Image (tube, helix red, strand yellow):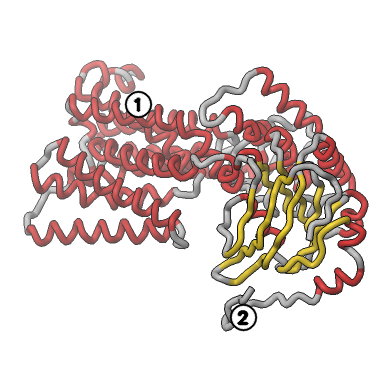
Amino acid sequence: MSATDILIAPFVEFEFMQRALVGVFALALGAGPVGAILMLRRMSLTGDAMAHAILPGAAIGFLVSGLDLFAMTFGGLAAGLLVAVGAGVVARATELKEDASLAAFYLISLALGVMILSVKGSNVDLLHVLFGTVLGLDDPTLYLVAGIATLTLLTLALIWRPLVLECVDPAFLSSVSRAGAPGHIAFLALVVLNLVGGFHALGTLLSVGLMMLPAATARFWVRDMTPLVVCATAIAFVSGVVGLLISYHLGAPSGPAIILVAGGAYAISVLFGPAGGILTRHWPRRHLEA
Amino acid sequence: MSTHSSSAPAALRFRDLTLGYERHPAVHHLTGEIKAGALLAICGPNGAGKSTLLRGIMGQLRPLGGSIEREGLDPRDIAYLPQGAQVDRSFPITVYDMVCMGLWRTTGLFGGIGRKDKEKVRAALAAVGLEGFEGRPIGTLSGGQMQRTLFARLLLQDARLILLDEPFNALDAKTISDLLDLVQRWHGEQRTILAVLHDFDLVRAHFPQTLLLARAPVAWGATADALAPENLLKARRMGEAWHDDAPACAA
């Protein structure tokens, strides 16, 4: 078996693999930058909370109209945006901090979802929502994921400066501009959008992984903002491709395979990353003259 | 209470201003005006309301009573360097990008940074003695270098009113003297400067006007008069503690 057989042939031979490739590319384009900013804003766990928050929405959509792309997307979006915007507004309008208000909102959302499901009493097959189907992406889903990636990049370009500035020096931003709060809310909406896009391919819980793992991995290699975002996006895409290949050759489920590859990259970076990895910290190279 | 002799127009006017937190006053019944182009030091013991006054001027705090008139100053005409500025030093950003933010007024969300702007940034870095630091991540700077970086950003903000909250804390003599030169340069450019300071010798040497604050204004005027021993003694006697059962202020 040659390298071509292993690496290229699956994508050439099978249409479902090509679709999956396009899918992970679009997902990486959106999730890479969003994850990097989440991490720098110290909101790494916010992604996880949001994933729980969209789950009931998607489940209600699923309950109402079955495995329908529109209903589940809409349900997830509505629930996620409600939680994100609600938590953001409460954090900025009251004394409560963002993490506490987000925890309150997503727990309520999650409980509500579980309540609705158990009262309805149907044993819904939520495996699709939980773990996704990257090998079964149809046209509308691909358009959705690609559309979300496009919208994400355009919006980020617009709110980039306030987002960065609010992380580094929030007092300065508030002294020169009022863009802080709208930028933050828009960003939270992007997080939800990307999670909703991701759950069709990877499932709600794993789509957080494609956001956070590449960002955390990239931080071990670069020390500047722009390369960090590029690096995170690249790692997300490569993890996607390698994960797909592993899933193809070993018959493993694709979503977890992709995340485990990203997790492997993270583990290696923790050890060997030149920007603050364990090895460089404990066995630094000889110090310089000046 | 203000004793200015110049006839310059006022940049800021306080009318019976009370600022505070949860009904407890931190600045109590302050009345007076600051002329455009003034170089004013704000002194007083800890908890005297100095930083609170700056926050009030910035509009970050709504007065509990009275008002602040900003005489045609747009919020963007005010540059503010908060005490121990809460910069996230671990954020991966370079000195150059940090200083570029001072251009916000002209570039905003989306404006490009052209060759002229780059020249300005370079000049600002040179003015604070940080040539060659452009590519350094801010996490690698010393405290003094960070403060120089923030001053370079202030330079680019080109503001008419500059508020400095304890700008020289924990800096070495050389850095303080470099940054004071900048303050003098701004003063020469007719900008209005308010600086919260604790070093009376430095204030006497470089600041013509002083406001001595101990919640209520103790003295306001020429530095030598305001920092007279009897005023300082009066300021020191200020009770710092809040009283939950303090009665409502009658004045």
Q: Position of residue A112 (x, y in %)?
A: 21, 59
Q: Tell me the SS state at disc 2.
A: loop
**Of the residues tagged 1 and 2, which is closer to the observer?**
2
Image coords of residue B171 (percent x, y):
82, 51
Q: Quadrant of residue B196?
A: bottom right
Which image quarter holds the N terminus of chain A? top left
Query: B26 or A240, which is in the foreground?
Result: B26
Q: Distance between the Cα atoms at labels 1 and 2?
A: 57 Å
Residue A150: mark: 1
Residue B171 visible in this rendered orientation of the protein: yes
State yes or no: discs 1 and 2 in contact (Cβ < 8 Å): no
What residue is pinned by disc 2? B243
Give me the residue at 73% from left, 49% from top. B164
Q: Amino acid at mark 2?
A: His
Q: Quadrant of residue A30?
A: top left
- Compared across the picture, whether B202 is left or right of B127 comes to right
What percent of the width, then of the height, locates residue A263? 41, 42
Looking at the image, the residue that sits furthest to the bottom is B245
- The residue located at (46%, 45%) in the rendering is A181
Label 1 amino acid? Thr
